Amino acid sequence: MRVLNVEDDPMKHDNIKRALNRMGITDITYVECENDAMISVLDSIENNTPYDLIISDMQFPLFSNGKPDDTAGETFIAELQEHNIDIPIIVCSSFRLNIPNILGCVHYNPNDPDLYEEFRKLIVVKK
């Protein structure tokens, strides 16, 4: 399973990666901004190696070295939909969210960063 993780916080990315690794998922691409995320998705499709899952925060920079943007996650999801890209999305955010047309939302609590059980409820790993 190929996963794209869109996250600008390295510690949170490590917690996500650790949970995915426990599930046997090791092919994880990490990007920190909306622009790089969209390029990565489009390149993966063009190379016939599309991602099986996207895990995205909702607040991150739109461009490299930019400041976090409150709308970046919504922008990214909308851009995927505009391109008719149908890759399941899990939003992993410190805000409790309910977003339509995605696989699910996982609440991230930095005081309890073990995401394994939450991801296990949403991700089916084919063996």
Image (cartoon, rainbow, N blue to C red):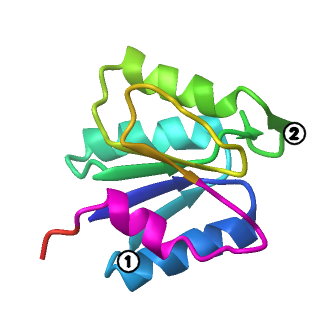
Residue drawn where x is 52% and y is 74% of the image? 17
Image check: 71 left or right of 90? right
Q: Nearer the viewer, residue 37 or 110?
A: 110
C-alpha separation, residue under disc 1 versus residue under disc 2: 29 Å
Q: Is residue 48 magenta?
A: no
Q: Earlier in the sequence, mark 1 or mark 2?
A: 1
Q: Residue furthest top?
A: 82
Which stretch is magenta? 107-124
Q: Amino acid at mark 1?
A: Thr
Residue at 14 percent of width and 69 percent of height: 126
> The C terminus is located in which quarter?
bottom left
Relative image position of residue 25 (x, y in whole percent): 34, 75
Q: Is residue 40 above or below residue 29?
A: above
What residue appears at the point 71 percent right and 26 percent down from the top-left corner? Answer: 71
Residue in the image at 36% along x and 19% along y: 83
Mark 2: which secondary structure?
Answer: loop
Q: Which residue is mark 2?
A: 67
- Determine whether the residue tagged by mark 1 lies in a helix, strand or loop: loop
Mark 1 — residue?
26
Task: Indicate the quadrant where residue 26 lies.
Answer: bottom left
Q: Amino acid at mark 2?
A: Lys
Q: Are marks 1 and 2 in contact (CB under 8 Å)?
A: no
19 relative to 4, above or below: below
Q: Which mark is residue 75?
A: none
Q: Is residue 121 magenta?
A: yes
Q: Position of residue 102 (x, y in %)?
A: 39, 35
Relative to 11, does residue 57 appear above or below in the rendering?
above
**Image quarter hosting the N terminus:** bottom left
Q: Position of residue 96 (x, y in %)?
A: 65, 43
| Quarter residue 24 falls in | bottom left
* Label 2 crowd (10 A; few <14 / some 14-19 / many >=20): few
